[in-house]
Image: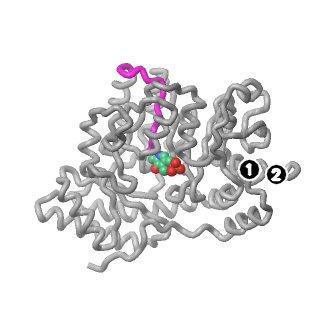
Amino acid sequence: MEPFRGVFTQQEAIPENAIAAAVEVLRSGRLHRYNTVGDELGATSELERAFADYQGAEYCLACASGGYAMSTALRAAGVAPGDPVLTNSFTLAPVPGAIAGVGARPVYVEVTEDLVLDLNDLEAKIPTTGAKMLLLSSMRGHLCDMDALQALLEAKGVRLIEDCAHTMGAQWNGRPSGGFGLAGCFSTQTYKHLNSGEGGLLTSDDPEFMARAIILSGSYMLYERHGAAPPRSTFETIRLETPNMSGRMDNLRAAILLPQLSVLEDSVRRWNERYDLIARSLSEVNAIRLPHRPNAERYVGSSIQFLLPAIKPDDARAFVEANKKLGVELKWFGDSNPVAFTSNHHSWKYVDPQVLPQTDAILAGLFDMRIPLSFTLEDCAQIAGIIKHTVRETTLSGAA
Ligand SMILES: *Cc1c(COP(=O)(O)O)cnc(C)c1O
C-alpha cells in the first residue's frame, strides 16, 4: 500500500491580501488595538464589527484566545468560586481549565455515541448539582439538538455559554452556533477555522454582560473605541466595578483575520467536500461507526471522528501505529496516557473525579483525524483507503 505523504498539521498559507494587511500594520507601528489615529477604527475593532455581523450578534469582543474568551464569559456572567458549572465530559483541556480558572467546579455531563451532550444526563444532573450554568462544548464540531437544549435550559433556569472552537460557521436549523445562549466563544488559534496563531472572539446580545467582558479584557477606559460594543451608558458603573484582566487582541492578528473571515463560507464548503468524501468512503466498512449528522446540523468538517466500538486498548494502539506507518495521523481518545490534544476527563486531576461509564465506553473506541485544507480531494481519497485497509486488517485479526 502506497503511504500518504502529506502533513496533518499543515494548514493553508495565510492569503496574500492578509499578508499585505499585516505588512501595512507593521509599517504603521500601531499594533496595539487602541493605538489609532483620529477616528480610525483599527483592525481589531473592524474585526469585532465584521464577526458580530457574520454571527448575527449584537456585540463582539476580540481577545487573546478561545480559552480566554471562555473564562471571561464565565466571569462576566457572574460565575463565582465554588459554583458548579455543567460541561461536556468529552471536550478539550481548555474547557475544564476555563471553569477552574474562575474557581468554579466542572460537572461533567455524559456524551452520546454521536459525540454530543446527552440531554437526559443533563436533565438528571441539573437538580442534583444545583448548577445554574452550562458551558456547552460542541467538541470536534458536533452540535446537539440545540432547540431541545434551549427549551430544557429555559425550563430549568440554567444559562448557556457555548464553546464554538470547532463550530465557527456551523448552524443548527439555520441559526449560527454561538447564538443559542448568553454567549458564544470562538478561537482563532492555528488549528481552528480562522488562523491568527492565537486569538479569541466572544459574542453576545446582552449589553451588561458584554460591557463587563470588555472591561475584563483590559480596555482601560477606551471601550468607546470598540467595534461592536454596547452604548457608553451601559459602562457607567460596570467600568468601576470590574477588574482589568488583560487579554486583548492586537491589530496584527485582526488584520490577518479579516480577509480570512470574508472567505470563511468558502472554507466551510471546501472542508465539507473533504469530510463528506472521507465519511462516505469509511461508511462502506461495517466495523466503522460514524457519528450521525442530523439534517438540522450544518457542520464544518475540519476534522473527522469515527468509532471502532469494543476495540481493545492494545489493538487501538496497534491500529494508530499501522496508520502512522502509512502516513495517516490518527488520534485515539481512549488512551490512559494523554497524547497531544487527546487528554480526557481522567487526566484532569484538578477536577473532582466523576463516574462517566457511557463516555468512557465511547472514548475507548474513538478515533480522530484532522482534515487540513492543504489536502486535496485525491489526498482525502487516499487517506480513507488507508484507514479502510488498516481497519480490515484489525478486524480480520479478530480485534475489532
Ligand atoms: C481549541 C479549543 C478551545 C480553546 O482555544 P484556544 O484558543 O486554544 O484557547 C476551546 N475548546 C475546544 C473544544 C478547543 O478545541
**Residue at 69 percent of width and 58 percent of height:** 252
The residue furthest left is: 398
Q: Nearer the viewer, residue 38 or 153?
A: 38
- Amino acid type assigned to the residue bearing label 2 in the image: Thr
Q: Is residue 129 left or right of residue 308?
A: right
* Residue neighbourhood size for the residue with mark 2, other residues' Cα within 10 Å, grouped as few (<14), some (14–19), many (≥20): some
Quarter containing the C terminus: bottom left
Kind of residue at disc 1: Arg
Q: Quadrant of residue 23?
A: bottom right
Q: Quadrant of residue 376?
A: bottom left
Residue 365 left/right relative to 238: left
Task: Decide if residue 32 is on the left or right side of residue 314.
Answer: right
Label number found at residue 33: 1
Give the answer, above or below, for where 214 lies relative to 396. Answer: above
Out of 195 and 265, give the one closest to the viewer: 195
Please state the extent of the stretch shown in magenta in the rendering: 127-138
User: Circle 1 — which element?
Assistant: loop
Q: Are marks 2 and 1 in contact (CB under 8 Å)?
A: yes
Quadrant hosting residue 230: top right
Residue 258 percent coordinates (x, y): 67, 57
| Residue beneath disc 2 | 36
Residue closest to the far bottom: 2
Does any portion of residue 298 appear in the rendered image?
no
Magenta segment: does it hold 50?
A: no
